[in-house]
Amino acid sequence: MKKDIILHFNIRVYGILINDNNEVLLSDEFQLNQRMTKFPGGGLKFGEGPADCIKREAIEEFGQEIIIIDHFYTTEFFQKALFYPDHQLISIYYRIKLAGPQKFVVATKPFDFKKNSNGIQSFRWEKIITLNPDDFTFPIDKHVCQLLKEKFS
């Protein structure tokens, strides 16, 4: 008897927030017992659309509302999820702006938190011109980093 394999799609939605100094906001996090650098955002929940997802994630992560400027990128290649072997990852990126003045704290160095504890996060600005794809943890973020450099440098 052949065992059926159930495969899943894992849809992630991220915000690309660029300030007046041509810097992009990065999120340094400790999740799943691992340090990671990525763009702010997270997983799409059942029943919400991608735009609703990034708006919800902004409230959860930044503590403030955002405005979507436009769609920037959606994954165009197969990417197996790093943490879940039977999941295919699809990532959607929107360019966003804050709906009001910045209210959240921004660090001046990567991983600016006292201890590695699952769920901890810090934000920092990085000039687009100095972004390095290798500084990102995940393959799709590395690709989006390169696209950002090509478009905004």
Image (spheres, rainbow, N blue to C red):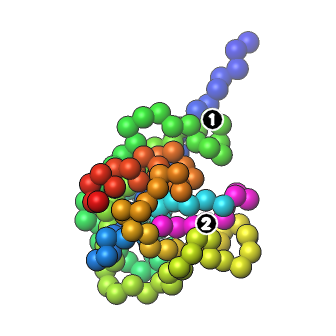
Is the residue 80 above or below the residue 128 in the image?
above
Give the crowd class for mark 1: few <14, some 14-19, many >=20 residues within 10 Å: some
Query: What residue span does the magenta drawing correspond to?
Result: 26-34
Q: Is residue 89 left or right of residue 144?
A: right
Left or right? Give the position of 152 relative to 146.
left
Q: Residues within 10 Å of mark 2 (few under 14, many from 20)?
A: many
* Helix, strand or loop for disc 2: strand
Looking at the image, is mark 1 or mark 2 nearer the viewer?
Answer: 2
Question: Spatial distance from mark 1 to mark 2, Cα to Cα?
Answer: 24 Å
- Check whether the beta carbons of the residues at disc 1 and disc 2 lie within 8 A of each other: no
Three-letter amino acid code at disc 2? Glu
Q: In screen coordinates, is 34 left or right of 122?
A: right
Kind of residue indicated by mark 1: Asp
In the rendered view, tell whether residue 82 sits above or below residue 120.
Answer: above
Judge whether residue 124 can be spotted in this image.
yes
Report the residue at 56% width, 61% height from top. 37
Give 43 or 104, whichever is nearer the viewer. 104
SS label for mark 1:
loop
Q: Is residue 91 above or below residue 111?
A: above
- Quadrant occupied by the N terminus: top right
User: Is 73 included in the stretch rendered in magenta?
Assistant: no
As drawn, the label of residue 118 is none
To which residue does mark 1 refer? 86
Q: Is residue 108 left or right of residue 2?
A: left
Q: Which residue corresponds to the image point at 40% horizontal and 42% vertical from the top-left?
A: 75
Residue in the image at 34% along x and 55% along y: 149
Q: Is residue 31 magenta?
A: yes
Residue 148: x %, y % from top left? 34, 55
Image position, residue 18 (x, y; %)? 33, 70
Residue plotted at (37% across, 77% down):
65
The percent coordinates of residue 63 (x first, y second) are 47, 80
Mark 2 — residue? 29
